[in-house]
Image (cartoon, coloured by chain):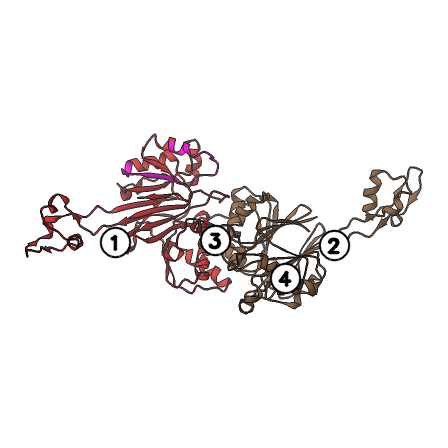
Chain colours: A brown, B red
Amino acid sequence: MMKLTILGCHSATPRENKHTTSQLLDVNGSMFLIDCGEGTQMQLRKSKAKFSQIKNVFISHLHGDHFYGLIGLISTFRLLGRTSPLNIYGPKGIKEIITLQLKHSKSWTNYPLNFHELSSTQSEFIFEKDGIKVETIPLDHRVYTNGFLFTLESKKLKINTDVIENYDLKPFHFSQLQKGMSITLDNGNIIKNKFLTLSPDPPKKYAYCSDTAYFEPLIEQIRKVDFLYHESTFLETHRELALKTKHSTALQAARIAKKAGVKKLMLGHYSNRYSDKQVFIDEAKLEFDNVILAEDLKTISI
Amino acid sequence: MMKLTILGCHSATPRENKHTTSQLLDVNGSMFLIDCGEGTQMQLRKSKAKFSQIKNVFISHLHGDHFYGLIGLISTFRLLGRTSPLNIYGPKGIKEIITLQLKHSKSWTNYPLNFHELSSTQSEFIFEKDGIKVETIPLDHRVYTNGFLFTLESKKLKINTDVIENYDLKPFHFSQLQKGMSITLDNGNIIKNKFLTLSPDPPKKYAYCSDTAYFEPLIEQIRKVDFLYHESTFLETHRELALKTKHSTALQAARIAKKAGVKKLMLGHYSNRYSDKQVFIDEAKLEFDNVILAEDLKTISI
């Protein structure tokens, strides 16, 4: 199960009802925070997320609208009495920024704060646990930036419903089969696992790509993912500005989605100059049809 | 004219409708920002303040609920195209914290950012312009902390309304008199200034005291001020906690107000453990009657 909650999806500066980038990804109950703009902790409260369940934070790059809320969240974790470790994955420099502020406030965390600083320009696996893998997606922005690819591998074999009706199976047989075990029927007959099961579901994949210019090298890595978040700061009317600031237009995001053959695309990281967001959808649909808009506090099942 | 807008008045961690400390003081149109907790820029927008008018920021201490919003505000000023200098007065260390983050985001401000770092444990004058003076008020907290005393000196002489009715004065005579000039009547008679004027109004004073334990040494400096903001994180029921964390109770804040003979007291910096704020007023009134509660986005004329 993958469930994504958008905490903020606007670029540059937060406004009263426009929050800067942060997302909470729930993978089978494990909570991953992706980016953490100013005010993210208030958005987390609005989303009713349990703070203590967040164990891993991924920061794409060190522009303020993606990480200025992190120090406040770290401090709040301490004030809430957190004891479990917090892992922070982000560009080299993030440890210095956070620890400098903790030093000056004389408020070290009571819980382990583990920094995993990133500096490779090649994709690397940075997390693996409980069938969940995270790898970086190198992006093309004004500062060192990574997107993140989340993969949930299903280890459970699927029950072959076409054949099991021929056997008198008890409920416990099903979990044995899903785990790959052969089963013993009441009459003593042993049925080999392979006769009753099919391969597990293919892995579920979520690709987060923000911030980046139009960048074809990322296509191979996100091919056929179930869900792609790709920034679309601008529309084609501001294509030159996108080029200059190393951001993407909605059309470019859609083109990446199309070339990668992803199942669904979500746009976000909108410039504050656009009041109507529907135009992003209209532009993206010229290239790719299954596209939706990120909205603050929107939740999507992937 | 002094007008104070409370942007946030809650301690420790920001919540959906409880913002951490920040105040905007308007002195004859000059805007002074006092402390800057996370989300202050959103509160500034809600208050309809003009960002470009803020030229001086005063940070009391380097606990997050008093300055985590500063880096975001500085970045937003840049994105809004600010060119005029911004002066930041705060404890030693603030320059390093801010510049480290600007360095990593490769986003230096396009406007001059002037840091005035404080480290004296004695009160010092740190600002003087247009009849407005600011001096630090050394406080007693877990880290190096200053309150701030804002003084507006009136240079305009007051017109003595008891005597001017005996003269045939024209409108321009009044501004001449307020500036200390003697005037010439239509009949050629010269009337000396001192016969028509009284001394200027006494200076107007606002004292901001947060965060601090009960600290009698500050009394002398804030004697008879027009308006005192004094933190009251706790009630007497949590007096031991106040002692341990170097905060004050509402009763202690009121006692300071009484001993200093201030005209009016405002309480704030409430712990999140109290849902009903009226109890702070009730406790404070045991010592001092003219007391009000700080509330987010409340504006008071001083």
Disc 1 and disc 3 on one polypeptide chain = no
Which x, y percent locates residue B104? 51, 62
Q: Quadrant of residue B126?
A: bottom left
Q: Say which chain tag 2 marks.
A: A
According to the picture, the residue beneath numbered tag 2 turns out to be A203
* B261 magenta-colored: yes
Inter-mark Cα distance, 2 to 4: 27 Å
The chain that hosts pointer 3 is A
* Tag nearer the camera, 1 or 4: 4
Task: Report if the CB atoms under discs 1 and 2 are less than 8 Å apart.
Answer: no
Q: Mark yes or no: residue A242 visible.
A: no
Q: Chain of mark 4?
A: A
Residue with the mark numbered 3: A101
Q: Secondary structure at mark 3?
A: helix
The span from disc 2 to disc 3 (Cα, nearest Å) is 40 Å
Kind of residue indicated by mark 1: Gly
Contact between marks 1 and 3 (CB within 8 A): the answer is no
**Mark positioned earlier in the residue sequence (2 or 4):** 2
Which of disc 3 and disc 2 is earlier in sequence? Answer: 3
The quadrant in which the C terminus of chain B is found is top left
1 and 4 marks on the same chain: no
* Kind of element beneath mark 1: loop
Q: Which region is colored magenta?
A: B259-281
Q: Which residue is mark 4?
A: A284
State the separation of the CA atoms marked 3 and 4. 41 Å
Front residue of A165 and B169: B169
Q: Nearer the viewer, residue A269 or A21?
A: A269
- Badge 3 and badge 4 both on one subunit: yes
**Is residue A149 placed above or below A217 in the rendered structure?**
above
